[in-house]
Amino acid sequence: MMHECSLPTINPQVVCREEFDGWAILFDPDSGKAFGINPVAVRIWKNLDGKTKKEDILQELKSSFSEVPENIESDFVDFVRDLVEKGFAGYEV
Amino acid sequence: MESTAGRGEKIYPLRRIYFYLTEGCNLACRHCWIDPSYQHADKVYPSLPLNLFRSIIDQAIPLGLTNIKLTGGEPFLHPQIFEILELIRSKKLKLEIETNGVLCTPELVSSIARCEMPMISVSIDGADAKTHEWIRGVPGCFEDTLKGLSYLVEADLKPQIIMTLMKKNRDQIEKMVRLGESMGADSIKLNILQPMARGDSMHKEGEGLSVQELMDIGKWIEEILAKSTSIKILYDLPLAFMPLSCMFGDEGSGCGVCKIQEILGVLADGSYALCGIGRNIPELTFGHAAYDNLEDIWRNSEVLRQIRNGLPNRLKGICGKCLMKNICRGSCIAQNYYRNKDLWAPFWYCDEAYREGIFPEGRYV
């Protein structure tokens, strides 16, 4: 479950490889798992630095992308939860 | 998703069976990777007996079966194709068919339409009769195929056209798209010529396209051709060469994703096999529907167990280094084995690209 007040930070082992079309591959060298993320998700990934707040990331997405869906906040929460479940991001203990 | 058995072993559901229904085919395609015998009025070849088909289905449903693919040879050559379709319908199995379309009739199409979510692909390799028939080896088949396609369109079955790319037809891709538009096809899938069986001979004779040429075609399709048509174009390159949006996007086709761990092939003689490759590679067959229990074959076949345990981590060469290996799984294990007698050998296209220094840099470690 996603923590209410804080965001996870990216797993520093995970490699993010951006491609020409704005998409990127997240790759965990330990497990060999990899998956692709779209340009909006790439921007979220780059902001999971332990400092930037959720509201600020959402604001940046809305100002940077022309067709941000109305339910961007729930997509954001789902994506971050997915990252945590995959071990690609986590909370500091 | 696989589950876990009591002794800690994963249990893989058998989701899909590919039935290679007939040993013969009514066309004689230069590039065929199955290499069936040419069937005509004077010579008929065996087909999978209906009682074996029924028995396999009955055994497979408890193992998780949801999808059936009918292919060949040519599936519509099967003398009991109507009974086979009725059985598939009665079991509510999703149906996929690969056909050359020549034997399609309104009656057959109606029988297909009664099945669950039928998905039909019709092979057309040239946008004109001269090219198509040069590749497919039988005069007159172009018009018959178009007629068959029209029946499928009329029944709203949204057929897909499959075109295999080679030197002979590389300049006809756009014409094929326009033909598909005019006929009412739903999509066009462009396959690369695979160096197996007759396709291997074509490659050796220089009739295939180079990796670079195929990559250039992919770029042209993505940047120009796809934007000029409402027909969906699926280009069947290995995943490392495809945009991430195709694999992970909302409108991605899922193309190129290998489902080898949930598939079993059945040959026209009743043998169980990895896929149609079993016709040419006997060690990739696992028993026979007439005297072997399907559950036993599916759970305990040594080759299937090796594949389940080895994929993707045992893949060698560029496939072992590829970031897509968890999804792509070596692209085509059967073909890799055919060429190298090694299940873990890299896929030929990726291997050639890597050797030539044109494998996408960001896609491997």
Image (cartoon, rainbow, N blue to C red):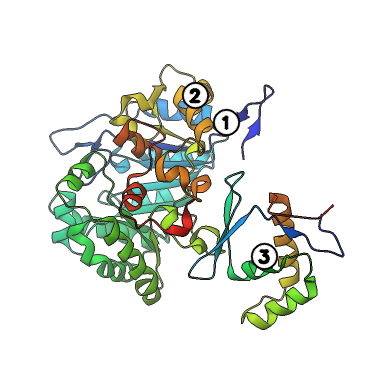
Task: Determine the residue positioned at 75% across, 64% down.
Answer: A77
Q: Is there one chain holding both mark 3 and mark 1?
A: no
Mark 3, chain letter? Answer: A
Q: Nearer the viewer, residue B201 or B48?
A: B201
In the picture, measured across the screen, residue B37 lies left or right of residue A74, that is: left
Task: Give the answer, above or below, for where B347 lies relative to B189.
Answer: above
Q: Is there one chain holding both mark 2 and mark 1?
A: yes
Secondary structure at badge 3 equals: helix
Does the rendering let one see residue B323? Answer: yes
Residue of label 3 = A45
Q: Amino acid at mark 1?
A: Leu
Residue of label 2 = B294
In the picture, measured across the screen, residue B153 lies left or right of residue A13, that is: left
Q: Amino acid at mark 3?
A: Trp
Task: Determine the residue positioned at 47% across, 46% down.
Answer: B321
Residue B168 is situated, as x and y percent measured from the top left of the image, at: 17, 59
